[in-house]
Image (tube, rainbow, N blue to C red):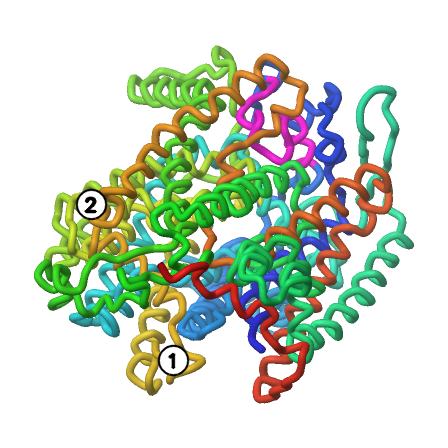
């Protein structure tokens, strides 16, 4: 009954933003459906605010990687969403920002941490703050006193005037620090309940602050690469930009206070002689916006009402396993047709939470070419390699279930990890008595694809972005050398000219980032040595890996909206260096991978601030303060729950079963307790060849794209194709099938043959469906969680899918 709770409020994040996109200017994406090269007019260069010379770099940093396959098209996308104007006198960092930002940071950190322990976690994200902080900020602007205070020469007021869009943005970014749970808490929970000995609150503070704040150093280091270029569009931030502008337009002033009113923009289509349709700006039609709003409320209401059917009373509609209906007693049909414990073949769904969720996102908001890449990767793994290997009995695969992330002993029973541990460390003598651990074939090849993805990502970035990265690095070096010599740098001598977008605001000095780096390195080294978390050289190596991964992973995410999970490389390295040390392994992953992920989250917020013309130093202050507040609130919440909830992190403590903590525990066992030598040695060592495969697999597609620049090969993106493989076997397999089907219907067929309808209503429809589902899930959870209905529509129709194909 809690299926939608896991993603409900997360769906709100994209849903309201997509609604706003439906009411704003919609960028030209017709070529994604037709897979044709758009004709870009010279007028695009007029909107080039960063000064990048696209005429000299027609492919640029977006070639072959992004939803918008050419830099000028991405520039059009930015111009459609981002205002060109800025009011430097507008209030920014105010008392209202500090008050509301602190409140929302605490609330989000508490709620997200509270639900982290539950079987279906909820994540409140930035859109929730965007929606709630606007009326609260407006009310404060009406009621707070306007008296001006003098604090040691610093003059300030609790109410400097009307609530501005810059305050709105800063409050949201301030609170966004509390949306992601601190990774150190996984280690704290696992040490307390499964491995031991438990960590103290002080150890948690040091580890959490280090992993969360170190990301700022790398965010500042790669700011010139990942934030300043227009080619680094960070697509999800454009949704937030349009949401901010339109929400501000709802205030009595009717203006966004940072450019044109949101209701002054619309879309006009013009048919070109050769190529897809061109979309230009014109005065909006109020009737068109009213129709979109009407569609939103009708579709949202229907989505709200409908979810009670598959969510509580007819769960079979969530997964309709056609193969299981045809042959309910056939084990192969059950294994191939089950969407939860099988391959998801011909498993359909009439539940929007299956079609649009945390794993997939909304299919209506995903370009068709990207979905094609993802689905090809899914088919290759789930419908080709996994079944062939399983039914061919590779590595005795048929003696285990076909799709599971559980760990097994040699007798095919669930592995008792505690039997091979002693004081939280691997016990060789106990291991000899109990025996080695086994994993399902699909689980093993998932790790093989992850190995391939690591080298594939690096190779892909070098091939597609190597020249641009080198030119940008050379330019930065020239500027720094000229500044140190006291000469005046002349940017006209460079091909890539950069006009600073924040000329009116002072930049964040490099030494601010350096101070944070030194302070967090000192905290990290001290904490690791004091609490035995990681040797000093391991900590330094982990930070070096984080620094090396930040740029390539950030490049792909900035242009494609997909972040490739590279946590496996840190687990692999730590497993080889410290076999049998699960705490070392988890700590190495925290500093080596989570630091990088935190850096990219901060970088994305900095790009949002750049789009919204936020003073960089104000943005930096809010990010740091919000991060520190979130750490202490989340630690306090977790220790309170662990000490007060009876049977927490066990099945008896439902719903506080710590499902995410258990997944983390399994990972620690695979890589930290047994290590890659034992787990991936011997017959599994062939998986290491995937590193070599990954290094070369982007090369032929890159050569084909260069030889045929206007062909379909320009849309092939191997790192994107491998993105969702890392979710399996955790994610239901039929989610990806339904996601691709709906993406094909809306973002290929409708976009190609009913493009006018698509541009009017597509984003409004997905916003309505996601929002109705989110609200229905929350209401149903509290109103119907004790309701139990037993009939055919609530039964498991693939009872054989969880069984092994054979017992010997």
Q: Residues within 10 Å of mark 2 (few under 14, many from 20)?
A: some
Task: Read off the magenta span.
Answer: 58-79
The reply to whether residue 79 is in sight is yes
User: Viewed as shown, does residue 496 lie left or right of 673?
Assistant: right
| Residue 628, quarter of picture | bottom left
Q: Give whichever of 520, 669 is nearer the camera.
A: 669
Q: Residues within 10 Å of mark 1 (few under 14, many from 20)?
A: few
Q: Residue at x 47, y 34 (%)?
A: 555
- Circle 2 is placed at which residue position? 677
User: Viewed as shown, does residue 589 lie left or right of 385?
Assistant: left
The answer to if 63 sits in the magenta stretch is: yes
Instruction: Residue 171: give x, y in percent of width and height.
Output: 52, 60
Q: Gap between marks 1 and 2, in whole Å?
A: 32 Å
Which mark is first along the chain, 2 or 1?
1
User: Viewed as shown, does residue 470 lie left or right of 245?
Assistant: left
User: Which marked residue is nearer to the observer: mark 1 or mark 2?
Assistant: 2
């Amino acid at each position: 009954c809690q299926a939608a709770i896991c993603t409900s409020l997360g769906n709100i994040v994209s849903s309201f933003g997509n609604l706003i996109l439906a009411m704003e200017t919609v960028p030209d994406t017709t070529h994604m459906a037709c897979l044709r090269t758009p004709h870009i007019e010279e007028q695009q260069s007029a909107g080039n605010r960063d000064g990048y010379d696209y005429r000299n770099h027609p492919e640029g940093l977006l070639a072959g990687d992004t939803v918008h396959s050419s830099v000028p098209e991405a520039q059009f996308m930015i111009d459609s969403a981002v205002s060109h104007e800025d009011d430097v006198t507008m209030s920014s960092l105010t008392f209202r920002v500090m008050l509301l930002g602190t409140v929302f940071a605490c609330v989000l950190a508490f709620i997200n941490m509270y639900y982290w322990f539950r079987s279906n976690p909820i994540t409140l994200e930035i859109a929730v703050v965007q929606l709630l902080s606007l009326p609260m900020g407006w009310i404060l602007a009406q009621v707070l006193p306007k008296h001006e205070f003098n604090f040691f020469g610093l003059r300030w007021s609790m109410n400097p005037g009307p609530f501005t869009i810059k305050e709105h943005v800063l409050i949201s970014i301030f609170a966004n620090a509390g949306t992601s749970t601190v990774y150190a808490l996984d280690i704290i929970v696992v040490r307390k309940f499964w491995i031991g000995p438990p960590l103290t609150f002080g150890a948690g503070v040091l580890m959490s602050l280090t992993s969360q704040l170190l990301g700022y150093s790398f965010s500042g280091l790669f700011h010139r690469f990942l934030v300043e270029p227009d080619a680094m569009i960070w697509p999800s931030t454009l949704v937030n930009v349009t949401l901010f502008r339109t929400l501000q337009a709802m205030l009595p002033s009717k203006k966004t206070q940072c450019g044109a009113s949101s209701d002054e923009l619309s879309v006009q289509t013009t048919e070109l002689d050769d190529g897809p349709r061109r979309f230009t700006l014109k005065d909006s039609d109020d009737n068109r916006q009213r129709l979109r709003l009407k569609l939103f409320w009708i579709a949202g209401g229907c989505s709200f009402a409908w979810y009670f059917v598959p969510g509580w009373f007819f769960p079979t509609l969530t997964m309709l396993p056609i193969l299981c209906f045809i042959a309910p007693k056939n084990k192969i049909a059950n294994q191939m047709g089950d969407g939860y414990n099988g391959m998801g073949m011909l498993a359909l769904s009439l539940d929007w939470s299956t079609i649009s969720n945390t794993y997939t996102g909304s299919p209506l908001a995903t370009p068709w070419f990207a979905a094609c890449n993802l689905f090809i990767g899914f088919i290759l793994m789930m419908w080709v390699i996994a079944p062939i290997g399983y039914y061919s009995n590779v590595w005795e695969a048929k003696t285990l279930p076909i799709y599971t992330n559980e760990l097994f002993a040699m007798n095919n029973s669930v592995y008792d990890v505690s039997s091979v541990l002693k004081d939280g460390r691997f016990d060789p003598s106990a291991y000899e008595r109990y025996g080695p651990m086994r994993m399902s074939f699909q689980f093993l090849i998932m790790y093989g694809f992850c190995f391939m993805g690591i080298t594939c990502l690096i190779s892909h970035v070098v091939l597609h972005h190597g020249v641009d990265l080198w030119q940008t690095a050379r330019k930065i070096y020239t500027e720094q050398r000229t500044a140190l010599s006291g000469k005046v740098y002349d940017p006209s001598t460079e091909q890539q000219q950069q006009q600073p977008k924040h000329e009116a605001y002072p930049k964040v000095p490099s030494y601010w980032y350096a101070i944070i780096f030194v302070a967090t390195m000192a905290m990290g080294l001290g904490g690791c040595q004091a609490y035995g978390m990681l040797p000093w050289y391991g900590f330094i190596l982990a930070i070096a890996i984080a620094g090396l991964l930040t740029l390539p992973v950030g490049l792909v995410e900035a242009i494609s909206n997909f972040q490739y999970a590279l946590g496996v490389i840190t687990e692999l390295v730590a497993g080889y260096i410290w076999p049998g040390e699960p705490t070392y392994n988890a700590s190495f992953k925290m500093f080596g991978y989570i630091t990088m992920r935190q850096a990219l989250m901060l970088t994305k917020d900095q790009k949002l601030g750049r789009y919204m013309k936020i003073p960089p130093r104000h943005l930096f202050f809010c990010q740091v303060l919000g991060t520190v507040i979130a750490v202490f609130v989340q630690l306090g919440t977790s220790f309170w729950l662990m000490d007060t909830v009876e049977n927490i992190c066990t099945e008896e403590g439902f719903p506080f079963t710590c499902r995410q903590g258990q997944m983390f525990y399994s990972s620690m066992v695979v890589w930290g307790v047994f290590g890659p030598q034992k787990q991936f040695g011997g017959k599994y060592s062939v998986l290491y060849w995937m590193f070599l495969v990954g290094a070369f697999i982007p090369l032929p597609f890159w050569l084909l794209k260069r030889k045929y620049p206007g062909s379909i090969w320009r849309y092939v993106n191997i790192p994107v194709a491998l993105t969702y493989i890392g979710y399996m076997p955790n994610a239901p397999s039929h989610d990806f099938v339904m996601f691709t089907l709906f993406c094909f219907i809306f973002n290929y067929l409708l976009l190609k043959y009913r493009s006018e309808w698509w541009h009017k209503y597509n984003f409004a429809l997905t916003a309505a469906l996601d929002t109705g589902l989110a609200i229905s899930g929350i209401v149903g959870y509290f109103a119907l969680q004790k309701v139990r209905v037993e009939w055919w529509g609530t039964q498991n129709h693939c009872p054989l899918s969880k069984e092994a194909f054979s017992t010997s």
